Image: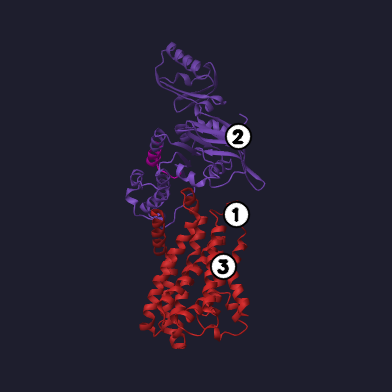
Chain colours: A purple, B red
Amino acid sequence: MQSKAIQVTGFTKAYGDFVAVDGISFSVEQGEVFGLLGPNGAGKTSTLECLEGIRRPTKGALDVMGVDPSRNGRKLHNLIGVQLQTSGLPATMQVDEAMRFFSAYHGVTPRYDLVDRLGLSEKRDSQYAELSTGQQRRLALALAVAHRPAVLFLDEPTAGLDVGSRSELHVLIRELQSEGTTIILATHDMAEAEKMADRVAILLQGKVVVTGTPRELTATGAGFTKISVRTEKSLLCENGIAFPAVHRRLVKDEYTVYFSKDPGPTVSAVLAYLTEKQETLIDLRVERPSLEERFLEITQTGGTA
Amino acid sequence: MTALVNHFAFEFKAGLRNATLLMMNYLFPLGFYVMMGLVMTQINPMFAETMIPAMVVFSAMASTLLGMPTPLVESREAGIFRSYRINGVPAANILLMPVLTTVFHVLIVSAIIALTGVPLFDGIAPENWPAFAGVTLVAVLSCAGIGSLIGVVAQDSRAVVLFSQLIFLPAMLIGGVMMPLDVLPESVRPFSLLLPTSHAMQAYLGYAYGQETLLSPLGAVLVLTGSGVLAFGLAIYLFNWDSKNDAQRGHPLMALLALVPYVIAMITQI
């Protein structure tokens, strides 16, 4: 049994003279949640559409669970589940009808439990056009996973979802992953990618500029760890107190915030200073650079950072 | 098989739930039928002789040319076909199911017209009911083939209206529906042979009513069948999952090949 769920090798997609994706390569392990990140026009959708068999690659090789998407679409359909960013269903198709319709084409029993679980139990007789955007996306997700695909493509899955639905989706993603489903998550929501993805690839102008775990990516950037300290007498708010590795300091809402490249010595020094001055510590927060900050750093420098 | 049954059931219900389709499948043809039955039979008593087949052909055109193509275009543009493709729905089914369900709707309307035309409006019943049913089926399938081809090649809803009206309006004027072919001026008659309604009406008159016809009824049936098969085959060949697809198999002008049987009929009849 192969361990790679997806293998992309030298993949190029061009539309006439415009090269949307330029010779990228990456692989995704089975059971992995893989985040595909990038600004608009980076080539995420073209990559996904070729992996999903909707479009043909201009050059390079694509492999999804041992299947070439452009050559063996029929076999691919039962291996993958796709929640398209702009997927549509016929306006008059009812929720239950959609589940029956697509399940039948996949040759599986309809999963009405998913409809209920994704909060659509009250809407089972409603037509697609009567659903809110969030409900339409939840239905699309239910349809995408109903046939228990080996690989699930999620394109902006939480766009338009409320907090509860988003949380439920994250639980569902974890469940599917624990059952061995490989999940490709294309999103603009960096917090979501950081929380859900085991590894991410950042695409920029049709090229993969960086690949790794969210922690690896944030560790390699020029980002600073944010150390926020609040004390009883606000002693640290006074100017002139220097701590090691601190790049910048600011005071905000009774907190003194230090931006440090090396948070260990900084925190140790702050605590030692407070002990020496017999100052009472009320709150201490250490926040490492977020994936969003790293993403912005990469995209603003054109991938050279 | 379950997938096909589900697909057929959904498309059939869509023909009733969708306001435009409901209008084109039932309200427009039946309303027009009642109006023609009340008014036209009074103005032109000769119309009663061909009212039943003429109104059946009219309902076939309304459903297949004015109703069916627009949802095909809208579904393609709304990304519905992409959802279908990802979930393994074959292109042939996407085109075949609307054709079959539209045929079903037209047959229901045809039955209503055929059964009420005589008692309500003194229409003339067909002499040969099986032949009437057979010609109806061929005519509807032929128009449905053209309708699906229009749905495939039209870029948007406005193009659908244009292409559909290019057939619908001439068919109403010179296609043997409102007046028989033999009363048309000689100069116009060859052009009427480019229209499916002319052949459908000739087949009805020859086979279902046992009348003398200008064209061979068999030739008319063959033209309708040939054009329908060609149109549906071309629709499958030219089918596009979405408008951004860069792998189109043929130029949309290939759709004109569906007219070849009509052109042959026109040339041979001249």
Q: Is residue B204 magenta-colored?
A: no
Vertical comparison of A180 with A20: above or below: above
Q: Pick whichever, B65 or A163, lies toward us.
A: B65
Same chain, labels 2 and 1: no
Mark 1 or mark 3, earlier in chain: 3
Q: Identify residue for label 2.
A: A300
Dot 1 amino acid type: Gln
Q: Residue at x 65, y 48 (%)?
A: A16
Numbered disc 3: secondary structure: helix
Vertical comparison of A101 with B34: above or below: above
Distance from disc 2 to disc 1, alpha carbons, whole Å, reads 38 Å
Locate residue B3: give its quadrant.
bottom left
Q: Pick whichever, A38 or A152, lies toward us.
A: A152
Q: Residue at x 59, y 69 (%)?
A: B259
Res. B163 mark: 3
Q: What span is in magenta?
A: A159-170
